[in-house]
Image (spheres, coloured by chain):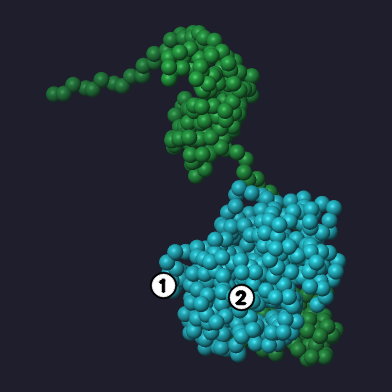
Amino acid sequence: MGNRCAVIGVGQTHYTTRRRDVSMAGLVREAALRALEDAGLTFADIDAVVVGKAPDLFEGVMMPEAYLADALGAAGKPMTRVHTAGSVGGSTALVGASLIQGGVHDRVLVVAYEKQSESNATWALTTHLPFTSSLVVGAGGYFAPHIREYMRRSGAPGHIGTLVAVKDRLNALKNPYAHLRIPGIDRAMVESTPMLWEPIRYLETCPSSDGACAIVLSSERAVTGTPAWVHGGAMRSEPIFRAGRDTVSPQAGTDCAADVYRQAGVTDPRRDLDVAEVYVPFSWYEPMWLENLGFCGVNEGWKLTEAGATALDGDIPWNASGGVLSSNPIGASGLIRFAEAALQVRGMAGDHQVEGAGKALGHAYGGGAQFFAMWIVGAEKP
Amino acid sequence: MPSEPHPEINHVLEFPGGYTRSTGPVIGRFLTELRAGRIVGVRTAGRRVLVPPLEYDPATGEPVTDEFVEVGPAGTVREWTWVEEPRKNHPLDRPFAWALIRLDGADTALVHAVDAPVKAMRTGLRVWPRWRHDRVGSITDLECFVPEVTTIVANVRTEYTVTPGAALARYLDALTREVFLAGRCPSCESVYVPYRLSCPQCGSVIEEELEVGPSGTVTTFAINNLPDPRAPQVPFVSAYILLDGADTPIIALLGSVAAGEVTVGMRVRAVFEGGTVKWFAPEREA
């Protein structure tokens, strides 16, 4: 895995429907300055910048990395843009970490963002390309059939998705950066909302958010403040249409988890990890990823959710921050998972802190559940 | 017997040529500055800046000083009221707001029109003057105030010519004959539809062509309650269909069946129209 790497700064904007007061450059700079402040550093202390966001067509800004270089203090420094659809935030962190682990740089600023109020993700994901008749309407339209297949296979009762939708929004009430903060959220409220892409209800989907997240990564010798040490990182991808592909539990996800667990010495993730921030944009993906990531056996994920194991007071809290279901600036969503994992092991997660969290998983997926990025961070050096 | 009502008449009272008014030195300076494209206030003995200027300080009755202060050009809306139906003499011919605007550097507010959507109007709104091109020294040299520029519209469009590749062209040609063309991987023996030239799993070159379908089985589906131009109504069902003989499902619209009646495992058959697949329908009806 190379040299040791640590997260020494985390910065987030308050996720919200519209940040009309700032440009995209202003948005990313806000997160970057907060991360630098957390690390006690300035742009002058940064060797390189890595930026990630979802497809250019979302906001229609082509090559945003060129536009954002000044705002991120990257003039005269290496600047890289990462693009792996929804998993991009996670991949961006891992590309940044690799620059430290490979000994290339001592301090790397990693930033990811989306300004969904200036974007139309459903349109951008549903462009009618010539010569195809593929009928997918937005991300929900793509993932709904796979959720239906999970429900059929596992025999999960219909309310499991509702439980996740409520649990993550209750957690969001403890996170000042979360977008959806719904007082009184409960099952009845979720179940009263309409089906958008049956079996996905309105309140079982993520919101559209404006926001940016930034982290400062450091080599061991350049650490300032409170570090979260990277114990492992992995990415995997797979073709979207290959014969025998399991779209409910993709091989790429299982392989990626096995790789990151091996690096971090994790043999039983439910026991060995203290908290997980996992990319759950539609509520049913919690039980699906519980299985894909090996927190339980096949078709058992919904039982953990139902038993409250993933709640903030459960034995393995998932998405203590409120997760993607509560804040979704798409390009940043993966990095937020990675950053929240780091905040937990640094003991800096505030009201949604899991007491004594020593090891945390950050997870992101993207495309048609084809791209996976994960890391495990710890309070102790690896 | 009541008498006939008197007919309505129109009466105009207008002083020929308009009255002449002397502005005095204070108001005159204000109007002269407006003509030059500037807004000034006058300072009182108590150091307040009155905009528009007055000759006598309303707080004390004392004459104001002879110190004029340039203010604005931007200001902040303090209070406002909405005019839904402008009258003939109003400064704008579309709905607008009358607002009390405190110009930057002033201690009092100026009444003027704000040209903005009602949704944008709020106390605290920052506004800038829109000047008339030909100014005469009148308060209407300021046509109105408008909000700050906070958003722009960026039109993004790309247009290009594209032709299907060799494999896709063969597949599309076959569809016009109402045939689904597939390819079998020589290594892993998986059958791919649409027909393609290499296996996405093992990378082997695909040479063997075969026909699959036109019937198949629904493996899973979504009931979409959001409209889509390609679907005839809402809700519509987009389904993964494993064509008979194929190893990869295709995503397609289901027709001739109510959304609530679709089941996993349902047998469906392609319905062709205009040389391509219109949708899939339950086999019993196809």
Q: Give the residue number, with chain letter if any, for mark 1.
A: A188
**Of the pair A190 and A153, the residue shown nearer to us:** A190
As drawn, A323 above or below A286: above
Decide if residue A157 is on the left or right side of residue A177. Answer: left
Q: Residue furthest left?
A: B1
As drawn, A109 above or below A26: below
Q: Quadrant of residue B205?
A: bottom right
Question: What is the display colour for chain A?
Answer: cyan
**Of the pair A152 and A29, the residue shown nearer to us:** A29
Image quarter hosting the N terminus of chain B: top left
Gap between marks 1 and 2 measured at Cα: 32 Å
Q: Give the residue number, with chain letter if any, for mark 2.
A: A357
Q: Is residue B175 visible?
A: no
Mark in front: 1 vs 2: 2
Kindly indicate whether the residues beneath marks 1 and 2 are on one polypeptide chain: yes
Q: Quadrant of residue B13?
A: top left
Tell me the subunit letter for badge 2. Answer: A
Q: Secondary structure at mark 2?
A: loop
> Which mark sits nearer the N-terminus, 1 or 2?
1
Question: What is the display colour for chain B?
Answer: green
Question: What residue type is disc 2 on?
Answer: Ala
Question: What residue type is disc 1 on?
Answer: Ala
Local crowd size for mark 2, using a 10 Å CA cut-off: few (<14), some (14–19), many (≥20): some
What residue sits 63% from the left and 45% below the top?
B151
What residue sits 83% from the left and 64% below the top?
A105
